[in-house]
Image (tube, rainbow, N blue to C red):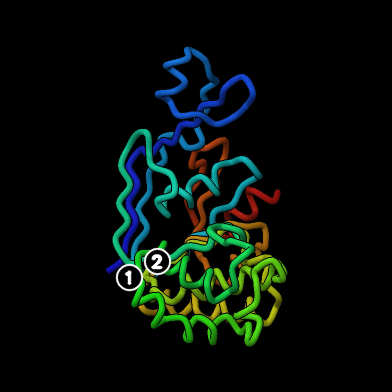
Amino acid sequence: MSSIQADQVGVRFLFDRQRNVVSPALARLHRRGTETWGLRDVTFTIQAGEGVALIGPSGSGKTTLLRTMAGVLHPDSGRLEMDGRLASLLSIEAGLLTVLTGRENALLLGVLAGMTRSQARAALEVIKSRSGLGSKFDQPISSFSQGMRARLGFAVADSVDPQILLLDEVHEALDHEYRDIVEERAREILAAGGIIVAAGHDHPMLGRLCNRAFLMSAGELAADGELEELQRVYLG
């Protein structure tokens, strides 16, 4: 069964004088840099079948938490355990090369998601069908709208048959027809004992997928409770 466990997770960022992100080791070497914590002492457990919404103002740590769950960032302190096949849609542009076609990008993203080249090739027609892009699938990404890019990214993510699905605002770039498809797929994952973690400002959509919420504030988990209750706290 899928689960996510975080124990005092912290993620640290360092900036040089030009506000560029640098590694802690490089900052120490040059004796410069301003330290800030994107996450600090975040602790929670998410069980199979739970949908969790991340709410809070911009800069509160929602995206940092999702990227840490996805393995894009690694905790500088604490422990994070992800149990289950993972798929994420965290950025519309993530991993996409505009000079390549949708098909070529799907192959690339599939390999980056952990498939072998042969597995990624075998999944291409399914991805094309799930994306609903039709003949556009074989056209360059540079001709794609944001919604089309989001469709492609979700279709690739869904092709790994995820038990844990992470969504970060990009679902809000989808047209209403495909948004319904994403919601239906998310509900299927939950019904099968999977986990959905979604961040965004589309609170009605979050309410359709989640009944639990984390209220984030300045990189900390300010509250963990029922979504409706925390929405009232956050929205005032």
Residue 180 x %, y %: 62, 80
Question: Could you say which disc has been placed on residue 111 in the image?
Answer: 2
* Left/right of residue 80 with respect to residue 153 in the rendered view: left
CA neighbours of label 2 inside 10 A, class few (<14), some (14 to 19), many (20+):
some
For the N terminus, the quadrant is bottom left
Looking at the image, residue 17 lies above or below residue 220: above
Residue 7 x %, y %: 32, 42
Q: Nearer the viewer, residue 141 or 224?
A: 141
> Looking at the image, which residue is at 66% across and 81% down?
136
Quick one: SS at disc 2?
Answer: helix
Q: Which residue is mark 1?
A: 116
Quick one: SS at disc 1?
Answer: loop
Looking at the image, residue 54 lies above or below residue 220: below
Mark 2–mark 1 Cα distance, whole angstroms, equals 6 Å
Q: Give the number of callouts.
A: 2
* Left/right of residue 223 with respect to residue 25 in the rendered view: right
> Looking at the image, which residue is at 65% across and 44% down?
58
Residue 70 x %, y %: 42, 54
CA neighbours of label 1 inside 10 A, class few (<14), some (14 to 19), many (20+):
few
> Looking at the image, which residue is at 61% across and 47% down?
56
Question: Could you say which disc has been placed on residue 140 in the image?
Answer: none
Looking at the image, residue 178 lies above or below residue 170: below
* Left/right of residue 129 with respect to residue 236 in the rendered view: left
> Looking at the image, which residue is at 53% across and 63% down?
89
Tell me whether the residue at label 2 lies in contact with that at label 1, contact meaning CB atoms closer than 8 angstroms: yes
Q: Earlier in the sequence, mark 2 or mark 1?
A: 2
Residue type pointed to by label 1? Thr
Residue 96 x %, y %: 57, 62
Q: Residue furthest top?
A: 31
Q: Residue furthest front?
A: 99
Residue type pointed to by label 2? Val
